[in-house]
Image (tube, rainbow, N blue to C red):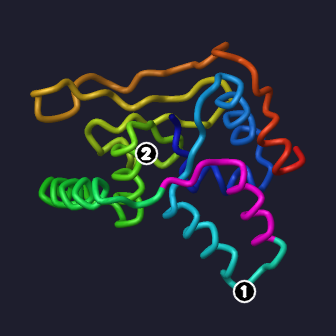
């Protein structure tokens, strides 16, 4: 399961090839593609700044219709609180929305697709960039009992997979 962060969703809305290519690649690999309620809120906020854009709101609704939108649940409440406290204690806080997005992602056993490197500060969260359609950095994965992240960033290229989708869901919703 992959959670699309606001960075990739905005780039997809603007038709950027790297974002669209990554989403199609994930679909073709048979991944369950999701986003969160928080990402949806961030997109709608952007549609009102500096002034409301009905056209952009329609695009957002079409895009969100292509994915599962994960809700905040009780598990995420505790993950968020513990994560926020841990990051703050280390002097590495990120904004509350991104901490909540990370908590929702982790409680659903998913990885996050984002170009925001601050997600890499979160032990146990797998972060996949979308800077190019087939390759990107991945966050280091912590080893249980080690109390932190072990290893260095490594590049992950996803090719092949279960096949099937061919980008149909994205094309159907965005008319790509």
Q: Position of residue 167 (x, y in %)?
A: 79, 33
Q: Secondary structure at mark 1?
A: loop
Q: Which sits earlier in the primary sequence, circle 1 or circle 2?
A: 1
Q: Nearer the viewer, residue 157 or 174?
A: 174
For the stretch drawn in magenta, the main secondary structure is helix
Q: Is residue 40 above or below residue 79?
A: below
The residue wearing badge 1 is 51
Q: Residue 166 colored magenta?
A: no
* Residue 117 badge: 2
What residue is drawn where x is 49% and y is 29%? 137
What residue is drawn where x is 29% and y is 59%? 74
Furthest-right residue in this view: 175
Location of residue 34 by image quarter: top right
Q: Position of residue 24 (x, y in %)?
A: 73, 33
User: Which span is picked out in magenta?
Assistant: 56-70
Furthest-front residue in this view: 74
* Residue 32 badge: none
Quadrant where the C terminus is found in the figure:
top right
Q: Is residue 71 above or below residue 176?
A: below
Left or right relative to 164: residue 95? left
Query: Is the residue marked by circle 1 packed among few (<14), some (14-19), or many (20+) residues within 10 Å?
Result: few
Q: Secondary structure at mark 2?
A: helix
What residue is drawn where x is 54% and y is 51%? 5
Q: Mark 1 and 2 residues: CB-CB less than 8 Å, in contact?
A: no
Task: Give the alpha-carbon distance from disc 1 to disc 2, as whole Å.
Answer: 29 Å
Q: Nearer the viewer, residue 76 or 12?
A: 76
């Amino acid at each position: 399961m992959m959670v699309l962060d606001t960075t990739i969703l905005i780039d997809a809305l603007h038709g950027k090839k790297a974002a669209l290519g990554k989403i199609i690649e994930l679909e073709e690999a048979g991944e369950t593609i999701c986003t969160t309620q928080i990402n949806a809120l961030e997109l709608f906020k952007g549609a009102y700044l500096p002034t409301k854009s009905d056209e952009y709101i329609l695009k957002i609704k079409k895009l969100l219709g292509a994915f599962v939108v994960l809700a905040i649940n009780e598990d995420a409440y505790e993950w968020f609180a513990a994560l926020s406290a841990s990051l703050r204690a280390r002097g590495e806080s990120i904004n509350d929305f991104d901490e909540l997005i990370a908590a929702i992602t982790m409680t659903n056993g998913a990885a996050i697709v984002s170009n925001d490197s601050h997600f890499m500060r979160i032990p146990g969260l797998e972060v996949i960039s979308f800077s190019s359609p087939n390759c990107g950095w991945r966050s280091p994965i912590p080893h249980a009992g080690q109390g932190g992240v072990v290893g260095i960033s490594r590049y992950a290229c996803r090719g092949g997979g279960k096949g099937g989708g061919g980008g149909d869901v994205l094309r159907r919703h965005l008319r790509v």
